[in-house]
Amino acid sequence: MTPPNDLEWGAKRISDWRRRGLDLWKALGPELCDHVPLECVEALLAELIHPDNPACADAGNAAHVMAQNDNLVVLARWAKAPARELAIALAGGFVHDLNKASGEVLRADRYAVYLRDGSRVETIDSEPLVVGLNHYGERTRAAIFAQVDDGLPPEVAEAIDACIVHHGLGSSRFIAGLVRGELGFGRDDFLSEDTEPRFILPDQPPLTLASVLHDLADSVQQMQAGAAWVSKYPLGYWRSSGSSWHQLLSGDGQDGDVPTGLEGQLRVELSTCQAILRRAIEAGIVNRSLALRLERGVEALIGGGRAWVDARDETLLLPRGETVYHQLAAALGGTSQDARELLEQLRPGDDPRLDARILRAAQTLDAARAH
């Protein structure tokens, strides 16, 4: 039997991604379909998650989106959120990162982006612009509103679209700093030679409970150790930093202005979650009791990951532990301290077999969290 080539693997992964979203929607039952018909969800997933969409080529992006949507359902349950708000947030979660590729067309409506001379920005053509402006993409907007003729209520289409737009500058500290030119990454893309902003950005849509859930779920995923996190960060964005596996899993380093390592992510994203909830309280979207429930939901979703990367001596000396170092020691032989020493010496990419073992260990963490 001939093994599948990369294109076949990619098509299967994309098909599995689309199917997983549909299965999640069906599992939640009629409570969601009363607000967003199943046929509209099927059409959105078919229209946006396919091999011709360059944003779907990134396996790390796929893993991140799927894990984020699991988080969203958990947080909605912690919040006892109305079905309509969960339906809006989850439909937005399925498709919000699907403008994330160079060459994507930006929208021409009230959420258009302009240059300082008043001309409209039509496409995004660099990695920093993709990261900072993809939430203003036309691809998802067009797909969402195309469903209005097929049974999606117009006000629900508006709410799903607003949820996606809001998620960019409306919640992410990283994106806000990026578009203001505060980071080394992308500074020349967002600031002119006279250090003035190059772009005039649209006003953000109003905050809603759906956007609070959506934003929290995404922020949690940025600091949620597991297979999606390992793929996106140590094996993805942070690979070029030159940091060791130990630094990325258990440390708090910096790559220029951007924190690398789970501790750095926790610091930034926990602060982001707190700011999301603070704004939601101020806007009257949630009360303090509901905010506290959501805080506890966030803690529940990240707690296992924090324990998994605990590299303190007192933890590694435990004969039975659930850390990545204990798991590697069991697989490779030796002690947990030996495993830590190995990860202090090697970087992602140095030993593909080690990379694969760490990814498998992360999958066991995901399985425990899902259970």
Image (cartoon, rainbow, N blue to C red):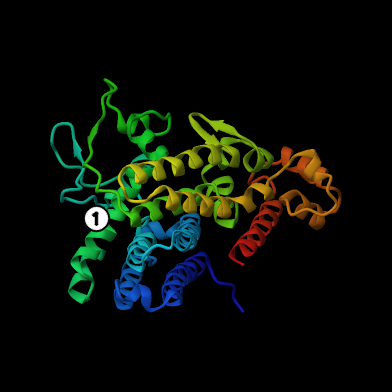
Judging from the image, what secondary structure is the residue with disc 1 in?
helix
Residue closest to the eye, 131 or 301: 301
In the image, residue 93 sits, relative to residue 345, either above or below, namely below
Q: Locate residue 351, reporting x and y percent.
A: 70, 48
Residue 24 in the figure: left or right of residue 155: right
**Residue 255 location in percent, x, y?**
53, 32
Write the residue at 41% across / 38% down.
173
**Amino acid of disc 1:** Glu
Is 163 positioned to the left or the right of 60 in the image? left
x, y percent for residue 196:
26, 24
Q: Is residue 143 above or below residue 178?
A: below
The answer to whether one can see residue 251 in this image is: yes
- What residue does disc 1 label? 138
Which residue is at 45% across, 67% downward? Answer: 14
Q: Residues within 10 Å of mark 1 (few under 14, many from 20)?
A: many
- Residue 224: image location, x then y, percent: 56, 51
Taking the image as drawn, is residue 139 in sight? no
Q: How many marks?
A: 1
On-image quarter of the C terminus: bottom right
Q: Is residue 22 above or below residue 113?
A: below
> Foreground: 271 or 333?
271
* Viewer-side residue, 276 vs 311: 276
Q: Which residue lies at the image location 69% right of the left edge and 57% below the top edge? A: 361
Which residue sits at x=65%, y=58%? 365
The N terminus appears in which quarter of the rendering? bottom right
The residue at the far left in this view is 118
